[in-house]
């Protein structure tokens, strides 16, 4: 009988300790989420910009992340306000940042060539030139020095 009481006491103590520890862990995780959501350099869910070429042509650019762990990244250049990217009409880059420069009615885009979708139908009244960044050192160089090269950056990260 004494053994049963002892086993019961340890079981209850273990359950109480386990529940209390779990509550502390949830509280710590919640505080960490609140403190990182508004930090600079933290991924945003979606950023949209409108680029205007010299001939008045507008190009809509959207950087978006999604997924349970925010591991899906996409930057889209489109002729229309973007809702869902169209692989037949839009330039789609599956990366976290793209660099660009407007030169008259030409848009030069500099991006990793690793995962890009070019449209089947090209933009009207504008010229798009894709410049592939092929190596990791080249990508790091452009990321660090894009302003020195006269480029702008579209990124999923807050600046």
Image: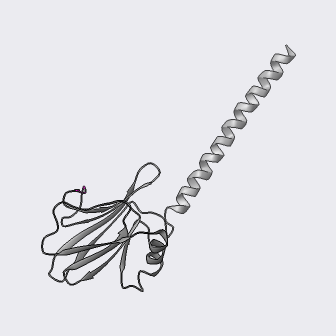
- Where is residue 131 drawn, in percent x and y? 32, 73
Q: For residue 149, which quarter of the picture?
A: bottom left
Coloring scheme used: one colour
Hey, which residue is sitting farthest right in the picture? 2
User: 9 or 153: which is nearer to us?
Assistant: 153
By secondary structure, the bulk of the magenta-drawn segment is best described as: loop
Taking the image as shown, residue 21 lies to the left or right of residue 43, namely: right
Which residue does the image show at 49% across and 73% down from the upper left?
137
- 80 to the left or right of 111: left
Q: Is residue 84 magenta?
A: yes
Give the quarter of the figure containing the C terminus.
bottom left
**Residue 139 placement, left or right of 107:** right
Work out which quarter of the rendered image holds the N terminus and state it: top right
Q: Residue at x 14, y 81 (%)?
A: 55
| Above or below: residue 3 compared with residue 150 | above
Which residue is at a point 85% across and 17% down the rendered structure image?
3
- For this orientation, the residue located farthest to the top is 1
Where is residue 40? Give x, y as percent: 49, 70
Q: Position of residue 112 (x, y in %)?
A: 39, 67
* Quarter-of-image position of residue 75: bottom left
Residue placed most toward the observer, 37 or 102:
102
Where residue 15 sits: x, y (%)? 70, 31
Magenta-drawn stretch contains 47: no
Q: Residue at x 13, y 70 (%)?
A: 124
The magenta span reads 83-87
How many numbered marks appear? 0
Find the residue positioned furthest to the left: 125
């Amino acid at each position: 009988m004494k053994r049963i009481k002892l086993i019961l006491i340890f079981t209850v103590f273990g359950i109480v300790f386990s529940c209390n520890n779990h509550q502390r862990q949830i509280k710590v995780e919640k505080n960490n989420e609140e403190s990182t959501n508004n930090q600079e350099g933290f991924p945003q869910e979606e950023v949209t910009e409108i680029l205007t070429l010299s001939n008045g042509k507008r190009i809509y650019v959207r950087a978006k992340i999604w997924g349970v762990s925010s591991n899906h990244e996409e930057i889209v250049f489109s002729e229309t306000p973007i809702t869902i990217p169209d692989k037949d009409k839009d330039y789609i880059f599956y990366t976290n940042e793209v660099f660009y420069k407007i030169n008259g009615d030409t848009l030069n885009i500099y991006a990793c060539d690793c995962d890009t979708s070019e449209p089947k139908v090209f933009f009207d009244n504008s010229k798009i030139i894709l410049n592939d960044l092929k190596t990791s050192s080249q990508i790091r160089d452009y990321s660090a020095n894009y302003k020195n090269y006269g480029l702008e950056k579209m990124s999923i990260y807050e600046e």
